[in-house]
Amino acid sequence: MAEPVFAMEHVSKAFGDNVVLRDISLAVQPGEVVAIIGPSGGGKSTLLRCATTLEQIDAGTLRYGDLTVAEPAADGQVCYVKGDAMRQAKSRFGLVFQSYNLFPHMTVLKNIMAAPIVVQKRDREEVEREARSLIAKMGLTGNEDKVPCQLSGGQQQRASIARALALNPDILFFDEPTSALDPELTGEVLKVIRQLAAEDITMIIVTHEMAFARDVADRVIFMDGGMIVEEGKPADVLGNPRQERTRAFLSRYTASSL
């Protein structure tokens, strides 16, 4: 089996006395699409924030391919890489937030170009060519010089996907990418993510869109209480879950949404 693009081993995270992640181990293979489902407060978003170093883990190991980003030190504390190694790690993933997180004062084009130029120190002309190509791929041609407030929510989210792709990452993380959108705009964004899955882009997607998870994911993970309760093929986890907690969660959804 190929080396995982991304791996967490025995990761825990707490905020004060509130333990949010409990002994999480997860590995994602190249080209794999993993959907993470579960109730609010179950740890899904914190898992992504820890994976992308927005939060530091309290225990365990974090790796991107052959690069170990965080691991336990001799004193039991978790030690993170610094400097060039951390910059390299951050160029291996892209993160798409539920609230877009575009720079409000920058145009669409400049939002997409910023990280490759600033973080990766790449040639501006080459970056602009790739950015314009991504804009076309996301169906945003004609919006290059608009700022985020001039776009619909679906357009903003597609721009944020283009921004994440601009780093040519090994893996994309999506944190509830459609939760702020109405049904029509949700369809726009899910269509783009389906297209990325068809191109074998490696992705972890936190989502409440069960039909989408069933159709697009190679593996579904159900999280609750900061733990991975159940994981497996979408047909198994969504259609015939083994764990009572999974069944109880899915009972809230109609048969048509599954």
Image (cartoon, rainbow, N blue to C red):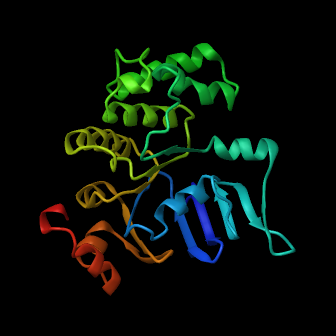
Q: Position of residue 68 (x, y in %)?
A: 72, 58
The N terminus - image quarter: bottom right
Q: Residue at x 42, y 26 (%)?
A: 148
- Quadrant in the rendering for residue 141: top left
View extreme (left): residue = 256
Q: Position of residue 253 (x, y in %)?
A: 20, 68
Q: Compare residues 84 and 223 and report the one nearer the observer.
A: 223
- Quadrant in the rendering for residue 218: bottom left
Residue 187 shows in this picture: yes
Side (left or right) of 27 relative to 242? right
The C terminus - image quarter: bottom left
Q: Position of residue 140 (x, y in %)?
A: 34, 23
View extreme (right): residue = 74
Q: Residue at x 31, y 26 (%)?
A: 139
Q: Position of residue 221 (x, y in %)?
A: 41, 69
Side (left or right) of 110 relative to 157? right
Side (left or right) of 33 relative to 27? left
Residue 3 shows in this picture: no
Q: How many numbered marks does the figure carry?
A: 0
Q: Is residue 227 above or below residue 98?
A: below
- Quadrant in the rendering for residue 90: top right
Q: Is residue 86 above or below residue 253?
A: above
Q: Residue at x 53, y 57 (%)?
A: 48
Q: Is residue 21 above or below residue 99?
A: below
